[in-house]
Amino acid sequence: MIDDKAKITQMQEQLCLISRVEKNIPLIIIDGVYGDETRNCVKAFQCACGIEPTGDVDYETRTKIEESYRNDLFTVTPADSLAVFPGPSHKMCHGDVDDTVYVIQHILRELNCAYDDAFSGVCMTGTYDDATTDAIRTFQHINGLPETGETDKRTWNAMVKSHSVFCYNKSYTG
């Protein structure tokens, strides 16, 4: 059995995360005390893993808790974001050729349905062409932004927010 408060606390934290993925593992209070609640949680974990349910944390149980924690950590934590827009003062404009333009065009194409086909002329070319400029100007007009046809930070943020609202909402995506 573990008798170090810091190690018990760490194990309880790991078991709490595991319980968010494995519903048959009870949620416990993290208090650094190896009491009945923690012992019962360990027993449930052992049962779920095919380990004899003693409630004691031996080498096999400890190793399995750590392995499950590492595996489940990526399941319950949010995905890391990817910063695509070059910087706060940057502007993407007509004639630019860049991977960011592909992303802008992709977002516009995804938003097309929610904006009544306002961006249907946009093709994913990676070139900030006339169709992209016109679509951005239309997007800016609809969203009350300055109608420059350029994608600055403010336009980018509005596009990303619109994408989050419309493209991940089943009532809009059909």
Image (cartoon, rainbow, N blue to C red):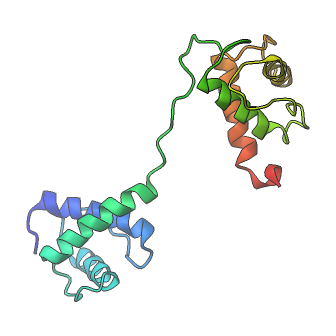
Where does the image place residue 143, in percent across and percent down from the top left?
81, 24
Above or below, 79 relative to 154: below
Above or below, 168 relative to 115: below
Q: Which image quarter: residue 120?
A: top right
User: Residue at 31% across / 63% down in the picture?
Assistant: 69
User: Residue at 66% across / 29% down in the picture?
Assistant: 102
Q: Residue furthest front?
A: 125
User: Which quadrant holds the N terminus?
Assistant: bottom left
User: Residue at 39% across / 69% down in the picture?
Assistant: 19
Above or below, 11 relative to 108: below
Q: Which image quarter: residue 156?
A: top right
Where does the image place residue 73, in percent across and percent down from the top left?
37, 57
Where does the image place residue 21, in percent across and percent down from the top left?
44, 68
Q: Is residue 85 left or right of residue 63?
A: right
Q: Is residue 35 left or right of residue 136?
A: left
Query: Front-most of 17 and 102?
Result: 102
From where the camera sits, is residue 57 visible? no
Q: Which image quarter: residue 110?
A: top right
Q: Is residue 164 left or right of residue 84?
A: right
Above or below, 173 relative to 36: above
